[in-house]
Amino acid sequence: GGGGNPKTQPGRPCSPARLEQMFATYGKTAKLPTLWVYTENDLFMGPKHPREWFDAFQKAGGKGRFVQFPPNGEDGHALFTAAPAVWRPLLVEFLNQQGFALKEAP
């Protein structure tokens, strides 16, 4: 499983049920909290599946935070490279909650 084809099947990843099982397995062994960041218009993953995967991760014992940003650009899958100012404050906050002493980059 993995990202789908945003041109022919936008928002429909390959084998979402297998990915849900995989993330549940990760949840059983994860030792540290994780931060899951998606957008509503991720054309590879869609708006629904990432939340289901995170829920499976948590139900299996994984700790973390799920954040789904509003649509970003034409395909929110590019959020990390196209809009770091959007997600960077969230990351700094999350890492600080984990005991790091970070300041927001200018």
Image (cartoon, rainbow, N blue to C red):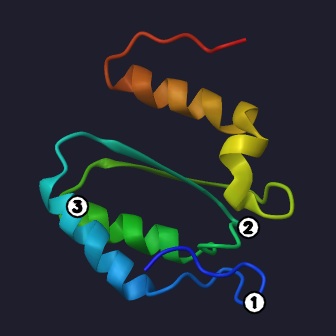
Kindly report the distance in space between the C-alpha atoms of the residues bearing marks 3 and 2.
25 Å
* Between discs 3 and 2, the one toward the N terminus: 3
| Residue 6 point in image, percent of width and height | 72, 78
85 lies left or right of 73? left
Residue farthest to the right, as pictured:
74
Indicate the amino acid at tag 3. Tyr
Circle 2 residue: 41
Residue 53 in the image, given as x and y percentages of width and height: 39, 70
Which residue occupies 86% across, 63% down?
74
The residue where tag 1 is placed is 8
Task: Please tell me in which quadrant of the rendered image residue 71 appears.
Answer: bottom right
Around disc 2, counting alpha carbons within 10 Å, would you say few (fewer than 14), some (14 to 19), or many (20 or more)? many
Q: Considering only vertical position in the picture, is 75 above or below 92?
A: below
Q: Secondary structure at mark 3?
A: helix
19 or 7, which is in the foreground? 7
Sequence order check, earlier mark of 1 and 2: 1
Question: Which residue is outermost to the left?
Answer: 29
- Name the residue: 64% across, 73% down: 44
